[in-house]
Structures are given as structure tokens and as C-alpha cells.
């Protein structure tokens, strides 16, 4: 059973449902069948039972993604900016962060790296709890959701052809989690321009 601080953190971002979606759950045979039957001219699929078109409303219903509003876009980060963000928000070791951005040739973090540092943070938090180091526990509890969310959006919403790393630039959208969590606990908005309700951000 997950700790209350963890459940509250995910609920506050309204991304907890992503845990049930990932590319590893996709039936590749089904994807191949759809790819063979797709027609780019009409954006539809010709199947045995007739023609089928996937609409934005279908995407919204299946993935619970909003289909209106502004499109998420960002500029690529330099290696230095990506390193700084990884060190500050993920609690990455500077040497590890440099190795990640060098090995991926850009501001990316590999999924294997994110899994490793997430496990390290959880184990370190357990040790800090046993020693009664509340300052370290608070720091690790701020960083662990950042790691997890970057990993989660990388394998669900923002997958790319590489399928083994995620752009660190997405961290920009999670860096204010501390303020959001505080707002949810107090029941009021803490980020200007963001309406915050318990369990929901919009």
C-alpha cells in the first residue's frame, strides 16, 4: 500500500491514471493490423466490419486527455540546462547527470536511469526515516514524485521513436509540485493562473 504522502502527491497532479497506461501494454499485433488497414487520405481504417475513424473525442474518452486548450510545446534544452534541472529537481548526482545528457546526446534521461534513481530515493528515504532526519525526508519526498512523473509521462504521453529516454524539458511542468501540494493541503490556489482543487489541476 502506498504512503499517504505519495497518494496525495499523485492525486494533486491529476496524473495518477497514467499508471494504468503504458506502451508496454499495447498489443503489437493489433497495432500492426491497424497500420496495414490505415488510409492516410481519409484518416480512417478499413476493417472487416466496415470503415472506422478514430476521433479526438475517442482519444479523450479512452485516455482522459483534454482535447481543447493550448497545445503543450517547449524548446529543447541545452545539456547544461538539462543537467541543472536533473540535479535540482531529481536530486541527480552531477556526474550521473553529465553522463546521462552525454550518453543521450541531448537533454534526455533514460528510463533505466530514472528507475534506478527512483529506487535509490525510496531506499534513502527509508534510511533517513530510521535515523529521524526529517529535512532529508522532506527533500526526498519532493524529488521522488518528479522522478516518477517524468518517467510516467515519458512512457505514456510523450513517447517517441527511441522508446528508451524522455526529454528532461518536461520537468518544467512539474517543478512547482511543492506549491501545488501545499495549495491542495490548504484548499486554495498557490500558483497564479492555475485553479487548484483537491485532486485536480487545470
Image (cartoon, rainbow, N blue to C red):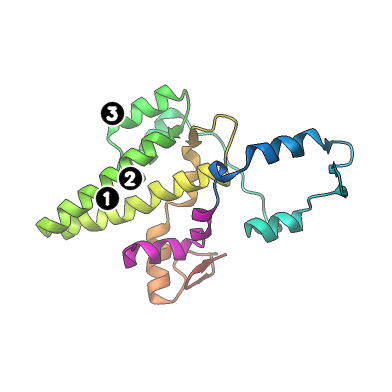
- Magenta stretch? 1-20
First in sequence: mark 1 or mark 3?
A: 3
Q: Residues within 10 Å of mark 1 (few under 14, many from 20)?
A: some
Quadrant for the N terminus in the image: bottom left
Q: Residues within 10 Å of mark 3 (few under 14, many from 20)?
A: few
Q: Nearer the viewer, mark 1 or mark 3?
A: 1
Residue 70, x across and y down, in percent: 67, 54
Distance (Cα) linking label 1 and label 3: 20 Å
Viewer-nearest residue: 155 or 175: 155
Q: Which residue is mark 1?
A: 122
40 to 199, vertically: above or below:
above
Viewer-nearest residue: 30 or 135: 30
Q: Which residue is mark 2?
A: 118
> In the rendered structure, does residue 4 fall within the stretch colored magenta?
yes
191 to 36, vertically: above or below:
below
Viewer-nearest residue: 178 or 10: 10
Q: Are marks 1 and 2 in contact (CB under 8 Å)?
A: yes
Residue 129 occupies which quadrant of the picture?
A: bottom left
Residue 150, x across and y down, in percent: 45, 45
- The kind of secondary structure element at disc 2 is helix
- The kind of secondary structure element at disc 3 is helix
Distance (Cα) linking label 1 and label 2: 6 Å
Quadrant for the C terminus in the image: bottom right
Q: Which residue is mark 3?
A: 95
Distance (Cα) linking label 3 and label 2: 17 Å
Residue 50, x across and y down, in percent: 89, 48
Q: Are marks 1 and 3 in contact (CB under 8 Å)?
A: no
Residue sitting at x 57%, y 39%: 159
Q: Nearer the viewer, mark 3 or mark 2?
A: 2
> In the rendered structure, does residue 16 fall within the stretch colored magenta?
yes
Residue sitting at x 31%, y 40%: 117
Q: Which mark is residue 177?
A: none
Amino acid at each position: 500500500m502506498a504512503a499517504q504522502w505519495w497518494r496525495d502527491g499523485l492525486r494533486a497532479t491529476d496524473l495518477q491514471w497514467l499508471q494504468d497506461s503504458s506502451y508496454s501494454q499495447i498489443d503489437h499485433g493489433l497495432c500492426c493490423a491497424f497500420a496495414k488497414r490505415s488510409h492516410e487520405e481519409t484518416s480512417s481504417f478499413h476493417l472487416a466490419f466496415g470503415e472506422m475513424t478514430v476521433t479526438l473525442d475517442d482519444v479523450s474518452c479512452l485516455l482522459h486527455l483534454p482535447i481543447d486548450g493550448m497545445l503543450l510545446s517547449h524548446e529543447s534544452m541545452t545539456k547544461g540546462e538539462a543537467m541543472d534541472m536533473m540535479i535540482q529537481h531529481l536530486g541527480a548526482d552531477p556526474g550521473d547527470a553529465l553522463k546521462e545528457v552525454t550518453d543521450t546526446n541531448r537533454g534526455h534521461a533514460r528510463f533505466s536511469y530514472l528507475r534506478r534513481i527512483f529506487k535509490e530515493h525510496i531506499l534513502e528515504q527509508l534510511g533517513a526515516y530510521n535515523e529521524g532526519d526529517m529535512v532529508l525526508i522532506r527533500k526526498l519526498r519532493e524529488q521522488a514524485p518528479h522522478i516518477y512523473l517524468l518517467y510516467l509521462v515519458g512512457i505514456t504521453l510523450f513517447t517517441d521513436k527511441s522508446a528508451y529516454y524522455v526529454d528532461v524539458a518536461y520537468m518544467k511542468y512539474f517543478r512547482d509540485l511543492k506549491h501545488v501540494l501545499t495549495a491542495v493541503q490548504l484548499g486554495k490556489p498557490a500558483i497564479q493562473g492555475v485553479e487548484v482543487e483537491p485532486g485536480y489541476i487545470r
